[in-house]
Image (cartoon, grey):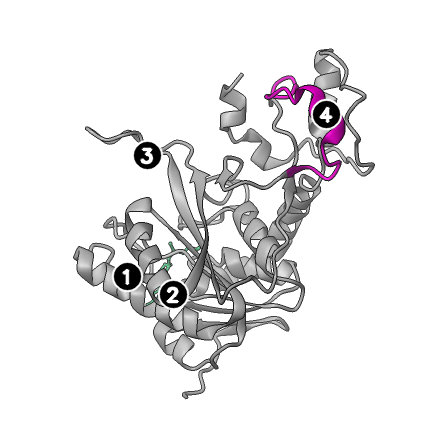
Amino acid sequence: MRTMIPIFQTELGRLYQADCMDVMRSLETDTVDLAFADPPFNLGKRYSSGINDALGETEYLNWCKKWIDELIRLLKPGGALFLWNLPKWNLPLGTHAKDKGLTFRHWIAVDIKYSLPVQKRLYPSHYSLLYFIKGDKPAIFHPDRLPIPCCRHCGGEVRDYGGYKDKMNPAGVNLSDVWIDIPPVRHKKYKKREANALSLRLMDRILSIASDCGSLVIDPLGGSGTTYVAAELLGRRWIGAELECSAIVERFDQIDSDREHLKRIQGEKNTLFTKRDLERRQKKGITPLSKDYRLGTDLSVREDDPDADEPSLFNVAI
Ligand SMILES: C[S@@+](CC[C@H](N)C(=O)[O-])C[C@H]1O[C@@H](n2cnc3c(N)ncnc32)[C@H](O)[C@@H]1O
């Protein structure tokens, strides 16, 4: 096993500017709690690392299978593997992970906003987030609860919960396998360069489901480092690899902006109504909230939440 030198490190994490296969091969088996990977989608895009994003189909899948196998080796029993990709690729890659002995948990559909229609096809409207575990049961599983979906204009509930309002958990609604509140990419207010940066809300949710403070998280395909920043701010240990790391190092230099963003994201989960929705409702003078709901107490306003500007299905459904 080769020792590698990180290009950047914190007390919690290590980032390697290297091929992810070399990094993973240098790590010990059964040591990782959560693995997440967001590979290039093989759509012929340009990456600052100069990788070829237009491989033949078999070549692309074989490359993905290689790093998936390494991730499986690294996972502890009960550890979680999340794979982010287009449905087209996650179908064969999910089958591969299952054939390699992982237990399938979920195919999570993450709503795509602003996608383009494709001729003679159904309108592509979701990314696939596959969730597997090594072994029979997850070692860690604590999904967040979400607020009741409300109209971004008037704050009114999008759905009527009828006679069940008093049964609703004050901590929010159960997380399902369809996520419609995730911005597709890192919000422009926090995006410092043109890169494929996932949303911090997505990584916060994944890390919250399947890791604890002190857990070890690995993402072999760093990009702009969203996984590492989320892990760092959530107190998880992390290991990262990327062929061209300057954007990640730069992002860590300005981590306060991600810290501020994450605080907002965290203030808007595990509660039945956000304070912002309650305020909108009051401003628009719509029917007061039913007293049947049992509400939590800590509802703080976040008027300047940048994610609030993202249109979502909640907003068009009414
Ligand atoms: C889609 S991006 C990841 C984006 C990331 N999830 C984020 O939120 O910023 C995929 C990244 O994988 C990197 N990559 C591709 N092949 C790699 C390899 N063999 N080793 C390490 N990184 C690689 C690319 O340079 C690219 O930045």
Mark 1 within 8 Å of ligand 1, using the beta carbon: yes
Label 3, label 4: how far apart the Cα atoms are: 34 Å
Q: Nearer the viewer, mark 3 or mark 2?
A: 3
- Crowd tier of the residue under label 4, counting other residues whose Cα lies within 10 Å: few below 14, some 14–19, many 20 or above: some
Q: Which residue is mark 4?
A: 165
Q: Is residue 119 left or right of residue 181?
A: left
Q: State yes or no: discs 3 and 2 in contact (Cβ < 8 Å).
A: no
Q: Which residue is mark 3?
A: 124
In space, the residues marked 1 and 3 are separated at their CA atoms by: 28 Å
At label 3, the amino acid type is: Pro
The amino acid on which the numbered mark 1 sits, given as a three-letter code, is: Gly
Tell me if I can see residue 222 in this picture. Answer: no
**Residue pointed to by mark 1:** 50
Q: Which residue sits at x=49%, y=20%?
A: 316
Q: Quadrant of ligand 1?
A: bottom left
Mark 1 and mark 2 residues within 8 Å of each other at the beta carbon = yes
Q: Secondary structure at mark 3?
A: loop
Q: Can residue 230 be seen here? A: yes
Q: Earlier in the sequence, mark 1 or mark 3?
A: 1
Mark 2 residue's CB less than 8 Å from ligand 1 = yes
From the viewer's side, name the closer residue of 78 and 286: 78
Q: CA distance from mark 2 to mark 4?
A: 51 Å
Q: Mark 1 or mark 4, which has the lower sequence index?
A: 1
